[in-house]
Structure formats: structure tokens, C-alpha cells
Amino acid sequence: MSSMPPGHEEDNDDDDPLPFVDVSDELRAPASEAGLHPHLCATLERMGIRTLFPVQAAAIPWLLHAEAAGLASDLCVCAPTGSGKTLAYVLPIVHSLLSRVVCRLRAVVVLPTRSLALQVRAVLDALTAGTHLRVGTALGDVPFALERARLVAGRAAPSRAEPDGGSSLVDILIATPGRLVDQMRAEDGFTLQHLRWLVIDEADRLMAQPYDQWLPLLLESAYQTFAGAPTPATPPFSARHAQPLSADRARATGVLPSTVRKLLFSATLSNEPQSLAALQLLSPAYLRVGSGRFAMPQSLREEQAICARALKPLHLATALGRLAVAASAEATLAARALSSRKGGKRAAPEEPSAGGGGGGGGAGGAP
């Protein structure tokens, strides 16, 4: 799109099948000027987040503009671990749903591991505290019947057809692929017919694993078409300068967009059409943070120890022990955040990383 904020440079390399925009590592933006709902601005201020990181400063305005203009376009983001990807998609989703009246399942966030999902849950709990929005999880950490009762209201006569819009108890669902498949295959009120947002976090890992064919099943359940129209074929990826389609333009041109906006986030996301074809992306935009296609996170620290050969195992064991202590501390913080949430208090969590730990962030910056 041409409405990208400053700090972006369009890449014209014809070897890339998807058009993409490079986002400068120096790009920053005040959180209060991102166009977010006042509740979110106030919440970010209480969390000490006053400045958006590059991935957030690029993705959030893009998504807010696309939503406001009714543009049917998906977004792929390649950004290093610890760069703030979680807030980049969570904030626009919450912003768009704060005006909802009836509780329907309108956003699904899929992650490869339970630990990552719990961290995203803590972020959403912090941002939705004091609102009418409800967040749920499908992670397999509790018995299926209990999990189901938290997501779907009981029905006297379960039916797979849900003309009344289902009976969801949550607006946003955070799930791992396997348990999401279990929920979709059950037959008592769970429906994706109102889905507006589909986030695939750690997309490279999820796309590499079939997980009982979770993606085709999810798209089959969520894909919406206009009345009487057949399901469209996968949109082409070769149209380098294709612009996002509005619903009116889509009808006029015969291209039928999905009502679901798909967001892919990963530190090593490919833009090869063969890798992304299964997602049925529509006029996708591709953001890449940093000058390199695959950038190392700034929070990564490299150390070396010069020692005698016989002492190498000892130094390695010491280094691994320090890493284990750090990982344990991060897990404790996540557990405390969830515990305080259950006790009626909300905690401001950190950005999850690919390994389940928190990412680094500067003082006054976004997690």
C-alpha cells in the first residue's frame, strides 16, 4: 500500500514472488499517535509503553487503515524474535473488537506451543482488562469438557448447523493446532462463521507441520463467500503491484475476498508462493523488519571464554546453567501473571519469543 508510514523502503527485486516493504530498524512512533482506541492508549501508558517498536509502528497503522477502509488484504511480517510482534497484531484486533455488541468468536490466534499461547493470553488479558471483550484458550491443558464449557454455552439440542450464529462465550481464541482441530470437529455450538481475524504466529513452524490438517479444516470452516457464489480459487501471487481489494471492487471484478484477514508473523517467514499457497492469501503485503531477510534479535548476546581444553566442559556447563536459571525466571513471571489474572488482577507480560521466553525491550518501549 502507498499509505506506509515513513521509514519504509519498497524493494523492487523482481526475484521475489511477493511484493514487500523493508522497515527500518530506526523506525519509532509514539503509541499515543498510532490511532488506537483511547482505552488501549491508556492501558499502554499504564504499562509504561510510550513508543512503538519498528514492527509495531509499521503494522499497526497498516492494519487500522485497512480495517477502516474495508480493504481485503492480508499481511505477512518477518521480524526478529523479541521485536514486539505480539503487540503488532494484538492491538489492532482489540481495537477493532471494542465496538462489538454481541459476543461472537471473531479472532483466532494459532501458536505452535502452549507456553507461547499462555504468554499471548497474558498480553490480551492485560489489554482487555476493564472491557467487555472475552478471551479464551484451547490448549489441551485442561480436560476437553471443561475447556469446551469455557468456550461455548450449553445447548439443549446440539447441531452442527448454527443459523443463529453459534453460542460463543469468547471474542478471541488463542489455540494450538491440535486442540483447535478438536474444537472444530465437536458439534455443540462452536463456529467460525463470524471470524474476522486469523493470526498465525511462528508461521514457519506451523506451516512445516501438518497437525492433523488443521489449516485446511480451519479455512474450510471460516471461509465466507457471497450468497450463491462458489468458493474462489487461491488468489495469484504473481501480481507484484496488486492493490488490496475493497468489498465493492471485489464484487465488480468477480474476485471474492474472504471476510477473514490473515496475519502471518515469524522471525524466518518465507515469501515463496509455494510455502504460502495453502493459506489462500488475498493481495498480501509483506513487511520485513531490518535490512536482512533473516535478522538476529538485538537482545541476543554472544560471549566467549578463553580457557584450557580440559576446562571447556566446565565452562559450557556453567553457561547452560545460567541459561536455565534465566528461562526459569521467565517462566515464573509468566506463571505469576496468570495467577494474578485468576485472582482478579492483571499483569503486564513480556513479548514471547520463539523459545517461549520473553523478548528484550528498552525502558519506555513496547514489549
Image (cartoon, helix red, strand yellow):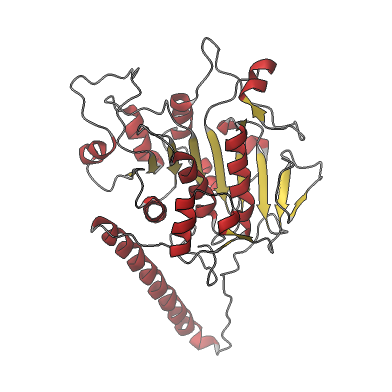
Residues 67 and 326: in front is 67
User: Where residue 95 sits: x, y (%)?
Assistant: 49, 45
Q: What residue lies at 68% left-to-right and 16% top-to-bottom? A: 252
Q: Quadrant of residue 281?
A: top right
Q: What residue lies at 27% left-to-right and 19% top-to-bottom? A: 159
Residues 276 and 123: in front is 123
Is 28 rendered above or below residue 12? below
Q: Residue furthest top?
A: 228
User: Where residue 182 sits: x, y (%)?
Assistant: 32, 34
Q: In this view, does 134 lie to the left or right of 240?
A: left
User: Where residue 7 sits: x, y (%)?
Assistant: 73, 56
Q: In this view, does 150 lie to the left or right of 280?
A: left
State whether residue 291 appears in this view. Answer: yes
Q: In this view, does 57 lie to the left or right of 225?
A: right
Is 142 rendered above or below residue 189? below
Q: What residue lies at 38% left-to-right and 75% top-to-bottom? A: 325
Residues 196 and 178: in front is 196
